[in-house]
Image: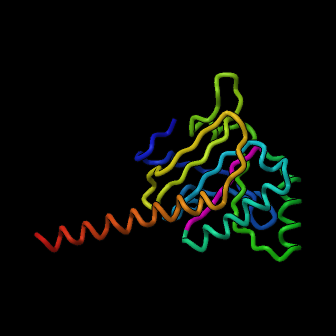
Amino acid sequence: MVPIGTLAPPFGCSAWIRGRVRRLSWSQLHAGHTLLLLFDAEAARVHGELCELNQTACRLKALGAKAAVICRGPLHRIEGWAEVSLARGEPLALTVIVDPEDHLAALYHLVSVDNAARWGQFIIDAAGLVRQVEICRCHIDANADELVRFVRGIANDVIENCNQFEEKKNDD
């Protein structure tokens, strides 16, 4: 497991962006923002789930955070979700990373002994530190309100730490 308080394992990936699969570097994906990584091998198989995750990503974007879901595909389901979302006039705020062979899942220690990919959620702060982790063997629907609450909590913690640093600096 990737421990809380450690640097998140960086990676390059293939992601569905603006109508096609493109390569993204870690710096392009993370870009110094709070980042939610949701490992859900089956997310693309459930059209409504990607729509809900995209709406959550819009809420997180308003807080200065980014969201990415890592799934196996298939690519035509991801494309179908994007077409429907655009037809509804919804912005595509969610980055969908395609990991058909579970390389990224393995990097984050989410492949079990029987080679089944686990569900996992990691929130990584702007400095690249893992601040929150949830892992489960079964699929769990993401809870938008909880994710927003976690991101707000991390933002408040960063502000509080900065304020304490400034107070200590002024005392010296």
- Residue interval drawn in magenta: 65-72
> Which residue is painted at 63% across and 61% down in the image?
145
Residue 93 placement, left or right of 165: right
- Single out the residue that lies furthest toward the top: 114
Name the spot of residue 3 as percent of width and height, x first. 45, 40
- Residue 124's place in the image compared with 108, above or below, is below
- Single out the residue that lies furthest toward the bottom: 89
Q: State whether the magenta stretch is mostly helix, strand or loop.
A: strand
Residue 7 placement, left or right of 16: left
Tell me the quarter of the picture where residue 92 sits.
Answer: bottom right
> Which residue is painted at 76% across and 61% down in the image?
52
> Which residue is painted at 63% across and 57% down in the image?
24
Q: How many marks?
A: 0
Q: Nearer the viewer, residue 1 or 76?
A: 1
> Which residue is painted at 43% across and 48% down in the image?
7
| Residue 70 painted magenta | yes
Name the spot of residue 66 as percent of width and height, x first. 60, 64
- Residue 139's place in the image compared with 148, above or below, is above
Q: Quadrant of the C terminus?
A: bottom left
| Residue 24 painted magenta | no
Tell me the quarter of the picture where residue 156 sits.
Answer: bottom left
Q: How is the image coloured?
A: rainbow
- Single out the residue that lies furthest toward the left: 172
Tell me the quarter of the picture where residue 111 sits.
Answer: top right
Q: Nearer the viewer, residue 11 or 61?
A: 61
Name the spot of residue 159 as percent of width and height, x first. 37, 69
